Amino acid sequence: MSSSLSPARASLAAVFACAFVTACGGSSRSAGPPIGVTVGGHGAKPDDAPHATTKGVPPGETAGARAERLHRQAIIVDGHNDIPTIMFGSNVDLKTPETRTHTDLARMKAGGITGEFFSIYVEGDLADKPTVTGGGSLRRAIDLVDVTYRQVEQNPSELLLATTAADIRRAKKEGKIAVLMGIEGGHAIENSLYALRSLYRLGCRYMTLTHTNTNEWADSAGFSGPTPTRHHGLTPFGEEVVAEMQRIGMLVDVSHIADDTFWAVMKSAKAPVIASHSSARAVAEHRRNLNDDMLRALAKNGGVVMVNFWSTFISVDYQNAARAWYDKNGKAFAEIRTKYKDDPLGFIEARAKLRAETEPLPKVPLSVLIDHIEHIVQVAGIDHVGLGSDFDGVDALPDGLDGIDSLPKITLALVERGYKDDEILKILGGNFLRVFEQAEAYAKSTGTTLSGNGSTRRIDSKR
């Protein structure tokens, strides 16, 4: 590396060098993809290799150099990161290096991220069992919002709070990381559109309509066992939630919701929606993933599917192995989960210890994650796919993706699959930016004020 490189630039270059050696088996070829890699994987034949490049690509540029150039150029947006829950529960911050998590400030910079959605995750139990000391759903959401503000305010030279697409673009120009917030679990609004608008005013820019629990107005897909069906989609109040979100410019997130709820959203949506952390059901059957009809509908809506990295969602082989593991070790797992309920890092350590003492789970190749991206491109189109890692909310990532600093490996893998420069830039964040800007434009077109023209509906209200 040239000694003139800044520390951050040199760090990213080192990550790419490491990623390229890992992916290519230490190949020293001067140009082109590694042997055995199919170029033009999204519908092209190996003979179509020239189409893997586009205008402006320097002659003889290696795959690794091209990936590094694109990664630096891209506005990279990740749709879902659960680090606020860990910071809140275990009293850690982003500035301190933390090997037990997927995210800290140094690794965010090394990964080249531009915009990261911090998940304001509200567990379903808080909707049913609020307590005087611990509060309920809205209290937890506000606590996590403040945790997020705290990190931004303590690291002003590296982070900025983003509430618009323009803020993300500004972060890129200023060499900062845009921190955004998305609510995970519609029960966080406690059945009040007043609360929805207040969370928007605090900076939350998407809301996942449910988590694994069905709430009072929308059915969840659940996770395992019987689907928690109560409404067969959205109730009239749920339809009003979607309408109000789009009126004010908050993105509707269809990850976690039941199939019937998805179709109800598609029927009423007037602006593009997102799936902040979902993958392709045709590649890996799981109720949390989107099937091909859903992918086509979301494309027609103009939205974007941000692919989840969790091994459970991207690999049926891993699902089967994990199910067998839980059949044998479920009791011990439940015990540590209860013991460390309020200490996320303690739970992570105990889980790792249990895994080390029992039969190992398989590693899912990074190529499987890229297969999900590729499938969504083939079905929905290149304009409708992005990244939604679920960092620090999952227990297993594809081989080589150890945390947010590993994002350059995805860019390299897309280069190796034969995607063009502009296509890679779309996948890494351009598609999300378009959707965000269109949601903002729709909200502006309504000509309404945030609260003055807002619905006064609450489920407990007769209005």
Image (cartoon, rainbow, N blue to C red):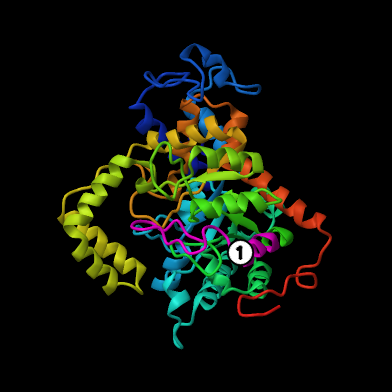
Coordinates of residue 182 in the picture (x, y in percent): 57, 61
Residue 107 visible in the shown view: yes
The reply, left or right, for residue 12 in relation to residue 179 is left
The reply, left or right, for residue 334 in relation to residue 95 is left
Q: Residue furthest top?
A: 47
Identify the magenta region: 219-244
Q: Residues within 10 Å of mark 1 (few under 14, many from 20)?
A: many
Q: Residue furthest bottom?
A: 132
Coordinates of residue 418 in the picture (x, y in percent): 51, 24
Image quadrant in which you'd find residue 357: bottom left
**In the depicted view, which residue is nearer to us: 278 or 359?**
278
Residue drawn where x is 53% and y is 28% of the image:
66
Q: Is residue 407 magenta?
A: no
Coordinates of residue 373 in the picture (x, y in percent): 49, 36
Residue drawn where x is 55% and y is 76% of the image:
138
Residue carrying label 1 = 238
Q: In the structure shown, which secondary structural element does the residue marked by tag 1 occupy?
A: helix
The three-letter amino acid code for the residue at tag 1 is Gly
Q: Quadrant of the C terminus?
A: bottom right
Q: Which secondary structure type mostly characterizes the magenta part of the structure?
A: loop
96 versus 462 height, above or below:
above
The reply, left or right, for residue 355 in relation to residue 135 is left
**In the depicted view, which residue is nearer to us: 272 or 387?**
272
Q: Is residue 236 magenta?
A: yes
Coordinates of residue 94 in the picture (x, y in percent): 47, 63
